[in-house]
Amino acid sequence: GRFYAYTNVQMPKVSTSDWPNVVLELLGRLAKEFSPLKKINSVLPNRYRTGRDCIPPHADDENSSADHPTIFSISLGATRTFSNYPFHLRATLFRLRLESGSLLIMEGSMQQLYKHSVDVESTCWDPTLI
């Protein structure tokens, strides 16, 4: 398709020829490290302008995702908190502090069994890209 949809939002897909060089370099490094084990087929940058920007608990289980997708999440910029929850409970299973340069990999049945979020950081004023 020409669009990627999540949480009732449609974003146009962008040809890899239009991706910034830094994204292509990161993808090349990931592909070299993890290929042929994992196929990278998309990039979805999430920009958090300050610590007030967040993503509430969710699973990456959209129709455009595979049944058991492997998701590589690279954090660039300010340190942010990533939280993980059992799917049907609000109790936190674990929290990770993702520093700039962190690589988080979610795979297997993670999206079917758990939700994750990027939490509000009231003292963070710097931007982050995850």
Image: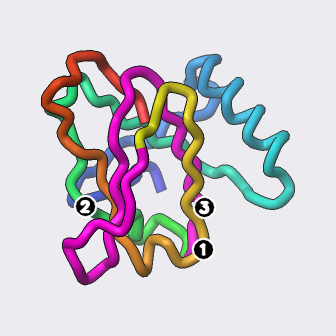
- Relative to 126, does residue 56 appear above or below in the rendering? below
For mark 1, what is the residue?
Answer: 108
Q: Is residue 15 above or below residue 111?
A: above
Taking the image as shown, residue 1 lies to the left or right of residue 16, namely left
Dot 1 amino acid type: Gly
What residue did someone put label 3 on?
A: 70
Residue 62 occupies quadrant: bottom left
**Along the line of sight, the residue nearer the viewer: 33 or 125:** 125
Proximity of marks 3 and 1: CB atoms separated by less than 8 Å: no
Q: Which mark is residue 57?
A: 2
Within-10-Å neighbours for mark 2: few <14, some 14–19, many 20+: some
Label 2 to label 1: alpha-carbon separation? 18 Å
Label 1 element class:
loop
Where is residue 10? Give x, y as percent.
Answer: 29, 50
**Where are the magenta residues, as a range?**
68-96
Q: Earlier in the sequence, mark 2 or mark 1?
A: 2
The image position of residue 58, as x and y in percent, is: 29, 63
Report the side of 7 relative to 108 (left or right): left
Query: Is 80 included in the stretch rendered in magenta?
Result: yes
Image color mode = rainbow
Which amino acid type is marked by label 3? Thr
Residue in front for this viewpoint, 74 or 60: 74
At a point 60% along the width and 26% down the height, the residue shown is 23
